[in-house]
């Protein structure tokens, strides 16, 4: 029987370093069968909603995500079936017509702010990580990213952080830390934790190969 892929969930607040941790793990498996599945691609389709209403979308709330589709896709990948990953267009606040073909791999890293919030997602994971970074560092990283990459003003970023991001983090994201098997402080800068994770993943892969 072919062993099922290993699924690792990587959660944490906006700007915590989730992506850095994920990419660092992936780099250790260069040449191996590994893929990253971002929860951000699975925001709900809003094509049926008036544009003015879409502008009010709270992207930090659990209800913003189409977890049903995400779970369906993970289950397909676990059965070594390819998927068509949706693409979200933030300029129109809904999905685009484009999809990305994703082929199954032996290691699946599911990364996103709320991947540990849904019990159904947690049940699919072999390892659950929470990247825990101080709020001051997270807001600084978010400021630099949104101003440089998204052309936003400092005032708009701060306003969104205070009124949406911070309260959503405290209400929905921070509580999911209790579900984590491992908490990684300071994200991608924590090389010891990343090395331990790589070793753990290798061990699981070796164990599965003998099933």
Image (spheres, helix red, strand yellow):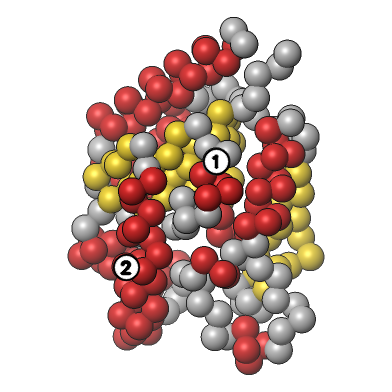
The reply to whether the C-beta atoms of the residues labelled 2 and 1 are less than 8 Å apart is no
Mark 1: secondary structure: loop
Q: Is residue 157 visible?
A: no
Total numbered labels: 2
Depth order, front residue of 147/82: 82
| Percent of width and height locating residue 104 | 70, 33
Depth order, front residue of 196/61: 61
Separation of residues labelled 2 and 1 (CA atoms):
23 Å
Q: Is residue 155 left or right of residue 146?
A: left
Residue 145, labelled with which disc?
none
| Percent of width and height locating residue 86 | 71, 57
Residue displayed at 31% across by 80% down: 162
| Quadrant of res 148 | bottom left
| Percent of width and height locating residue 97 | 79, 65
Q: Is residue 147 above or below residue 121?
A: below
The quarter of the image holding the C terminus is: top right
Q: Is residue 66 left or right of residue 166?
A: right
Mark 2: secondary structure: helix
Residue displayed at 47% across by 56% down: 117
Residue 123, labelled with which disc?
1
| Quadrant of res 47 | bottom right
N-terminal-most mark, 2 or 1: 1
| Quadrant of res 106 | top right
Disc 2 residue crowd, few under 14, some 14–19, many 20+, Cα 10 Å: few
Q: Which residue is mark 2?
A: 170
Q: Nearer the viewer, mark 2 or mark 1?
A: 1
Disc 1 residue crowd, few under 14, some 14–19, many 20+, Cα 10 Å: few
């Amino acid at each position: 029987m072919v062993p099922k892929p290993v699924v690792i969930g990587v959660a944490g607040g906006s700007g915590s370093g989730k992506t850095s941790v994920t990419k660092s793990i992936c780099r250790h498996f260069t040449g191996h069968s590994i893929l990253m599945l971002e929860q951000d691609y699975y925001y709900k389709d809003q094509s049926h909603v008036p544009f003015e209403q879409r502008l009010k979308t709270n992207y930090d709330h659990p209800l913003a995500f189409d977890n049903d589709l995400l779970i369906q896709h993970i289950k397909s990948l676990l059965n070594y079936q390819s998927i068509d990953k949706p693409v979200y267009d933030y300029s129109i606040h809904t999905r685009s017509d484009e999809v990305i073909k994703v082929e199954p791999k032996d290691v699946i890293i599911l990364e996103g702010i709320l991947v540990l919030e849904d019990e159904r997602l947690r049940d699919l994971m072999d390892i659950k990580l929470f990247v825990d970074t101080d709020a001051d560092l997270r807001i600084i990283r978010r400021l630099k990213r949104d101003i440089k990459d998204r052309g936003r003003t400092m005032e708009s970023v701060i306003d969104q952080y205070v009124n949406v991001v911070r309260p959503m983090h405290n209400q929905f994201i921070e509580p999911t830390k209790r579900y984590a098997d491992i908490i990684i402080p300071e994200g991608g800068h924590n090389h010891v934790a990343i090395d331990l994770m790589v070793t753990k993943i290798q061990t699981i892969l070796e164990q599965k190969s003998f099933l």
